Image (cartoon, rainbow, N blue to C red):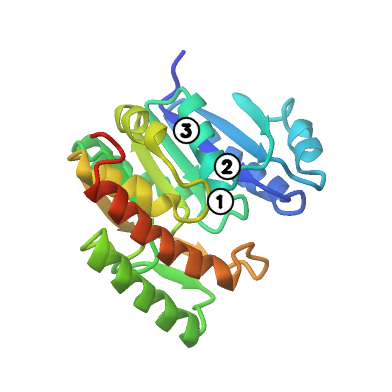
């Protein structure tokens, strides 16, 4: 049967962090009054991520693994979202920086007809544990102003890795993704906006991981990808 919720977890070299994340997600969803599935997309990990995930296949119901060569986070999320079966499809980070219990905040807006609900570390009511250092906050805010100016006015946190889409929006948006790495978050939101889907930004509790895989150069890459997305939209490369 079609589950209500699909949870997609892109994973690259996450052998250490993935087990606790899977345990936490399954624990919360067992108590939910809706059906669900959990999907790990192993994106060509070089550590024991695949082997660790396979150990959970007999412990967690409706759990499956998609194994692929490395494409980047965007490519992993795209495949997971499109192969999922849920009426609502949510992707979240393997480090569990945003617990699945935050999904409960999204449900009322999904019922109101929003096509995309995105977690935000900048919306009023959000909580960061521990708070980000001031220099990272300033850099993030400056980058966001650039993103808003070129692509997504009014959205204050495009990069939080906790986003839910309806099945319809998923099937229309994700096949068009051109970016396989960090900038895909902005691309899917820009496409959702272009297609007329309502987007809701909600505050979440976000636990900062000291072992983030995002490098300083990735931030510069993201800004360059903003420019590319703007150009592709302007020149109708997506053929919308």
At numbered mark 1, what does the secondary structure look like: helix, strand or loop? Answer: loop
Does residue 60 lie above or below 23 as drawn?
A: above
Judged left or right of residue 214, residue 187 is left
Callouts 2 and 1 close, C-beta under 8 Å: yes
Q: Nearer the viewer, mark 3 or mark 2?
A: 3
Does residue 159 lie above or below 39 as drawn?
A: below
Image quadrant in which the C terminus is located:
top left
Does residue 131 lie above or below 236 as drawn?
A: below
Residue farthest along the top direction in this orientation: 1
Q: Position of residue 126 (x, y in %)?
A: 37, 67
Disc nearer the start of the sequence (2/1): 2
Q: Residue at x 47, y 54 (%)?
A: 161
Q: Position of residue 205 (x, y in %)?
A: 45, 62
Residue that label 3 marks: 81
Residue that label 1 marks: 93
Mark 2–mark 1 Cα distance, whole angstroms, equals 6 Å
Q: Nearer the viewer, mark 1 or mark 3?
A: 3
Q: Position of residue 6 (x, y in %)?
A: 48, 31
Q: Closest to the observer: 8 or 112?
A: 8
Residue farthest along the bottom direction in this orientation: 134
Q: Residue at x 81, y 36 (%)?
A: 51
Q: Closest to the observer: 222 or 160?
A: 222
Judged left or right of residue 114, residue 24 is right
Disc nearer the start of the sequence (3/2): 2
At numbered mark 3, what does the secondary structure look like: helix, strand or loop? Answer: helix
Residue that label 2 marks: 9
Q: Is residue 182 visible?
A: yes
């Amino acid at each position: 049967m079609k589950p209500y919720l699909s949870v997609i977890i892109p994973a690259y070299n996450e052998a250490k962090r993935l087990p606790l994340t899977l345990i936490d997600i399954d624990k919360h969803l067992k108590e939910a009054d809706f059906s669900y599935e959990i999907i790990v997309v192993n994106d060509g990990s070089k550590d024991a991520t695949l082997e660790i995930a396979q150990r959970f296949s007999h412990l967690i119901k409706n759990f499956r693994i998609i194994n692929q060569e490395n494409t980047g986070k965007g490519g992993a999320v795209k495949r997971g979202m499109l192969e999922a079966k849920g009426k609502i499809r949510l992707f979240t980070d393997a480090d569990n920086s945003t617990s699945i219990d935050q999904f409960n905040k999204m449900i009322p807006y999904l019922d109101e007809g929003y096509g995309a609900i995105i977690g935000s570390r900048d919306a009023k009511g959000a909580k960061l544990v521990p708070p980000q250092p001031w220099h990272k906050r300033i850099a993030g805010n400056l980058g966001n102003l650039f993103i808003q100016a070129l692509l997504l006015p009014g959205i204050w946190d495009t990069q939080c890795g906790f986003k839910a889409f309806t099945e319809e929006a998923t099937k229309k948006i994700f096949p068009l993704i051109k970016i396989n790495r960090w900038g895909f978050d902005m691309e899917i939101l820009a496409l959702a906006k272009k297609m007329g889907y309502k987007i809701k930004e909600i505050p979440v509790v976000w636990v900062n991981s000291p072992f983030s895989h995002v490098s300083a150069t990735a931030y510069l890459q993201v800004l360059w990808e903003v420019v590319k997305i703007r150009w592709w939209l302007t020149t109708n490369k997506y053929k919308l």
